[in-house]
Amino acid sequence: MIRKLWNSATGMLAQSFKIDTIANNVANVNTTGFKKKSVLFQDLMYRSLRGPGNPVAPNEEGKLLVGQGVKPAAIKTYFLPGVLRETGIELDMAIQGEGFFRILLPDGRESFTRVGGFSLDPTLNLVTEDGYLVDLLPQELAGREFTSISIDSNGTVRLYNDAGEVTREGETAIYRFQNPEGLEAIGRNLWLATENSGEPLRGRPEDEGFGAIKQKFLEQSNVSMVEEMTSLILAQRAYEISSRAVRTADEMWALANQIRK
């Protein structure tokens, strides 16, 4: 009887965790560059009711195994591209295809993002909305004064003066990973490289395996409200059935106690 309650309880906890994840996806449906997440489940260890290894019926033929519930095993991030929205702002960048911008954190660590809503700090360096330094402009262009800037899809950067003349020109790079799903999310749409993701691979936009840069665009969230609402309904139904199983087990337990009396 305890097993019935335990199995149902693990089902309720698992579906509750899934609903939390869906709610987070829905909350970020309008967050620039957000990537949808999904829960992966794993069944728990099985218990043998007969056959070798069972102290009660070790000699009965054939194994009879019963499950002991479920647990959340991992959170999967879907790095499918989101829709690109035109903003008309020079320092807004999006990557069409595979790739990340490299961001330097205040503690010296490297992080990576798909969000290209950048601006200039007082020293004319390119920074994120949180003030983190963006490793996008070539070294020879960083900190240089300019009136306007253009970045081609292949990463060619040009700075212009008031007369519309090119004052400096250089090339930029983006980064990709062999296994982006192994990246560690740290919030603010930033990711850290891990052993599972592999080391960041540097390359020019439009090189093989790398996406193209789209200036004056931002990548939107890849969350689909239709998919999330469907998943929410399924999770709710699974939660309700698990809770109903708890009530049924409790009623069976009460009935068994009455018979004993």
Image (cartoon, rainbow, N blue to C red):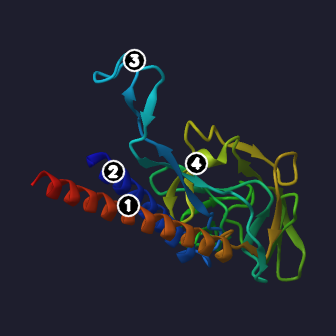
Name the element at disc 4: loop
Q: Which mark is residue 183?
A: 4
Q: Is residue 39 above or below residue 55?
A: below
The answer to the question of whether label 2 and label 1 lie on touching residues, with beta carbons closer than 8 A, is: yes
CA distance for labels 2 and 4:
38 Å
| Residue neighbourhood size for the residue with mark 2, other residues' Cα within 10 Å, grouped as few (<14), some (14–19), many (≥20) | some
Task: Using the rendered image of the protein, determine whether residue 122 is visible from the camera's viewpoint.
Answer: no
Give whichever of 251, 99 is nearer the camera. Answer: 251
Query: Closer to the N terminus: mark 3 or mark 1?
Result: 3
Query: Closer to the N terminus: mark 2 or mark 4?
Result: 2
Q: Which mark is residue 4?
A: 2
Q: Nearer the viewer, mark 3 or mark 4?
A: 3
Name the element at disc 1: helix
Query: Closer to the N terminus: mark 4 or mark 1?
Result: 4
Amino acid type at image mark 3: Pro
Direction from residue 214 to residue 80 in the image, left or right: left
Name the residue beneath numbered marker 3.
Answer: 52
Amino acid type at image mark 2: Lys
CA distance for labels 2 and 1:
8 Å
Q: Nearer the viewer, mark 2 or mark 4?
A: 2
Q: Which of the image's four quarters has the C terminus?
A: bottom left
CA distance for labels 3 and 1:
30 Å
- Residue at coordinates 85% horizontally, 68% vertically from top-left? 167
Name the residue beneath numbered marker 1.
Answer: 245
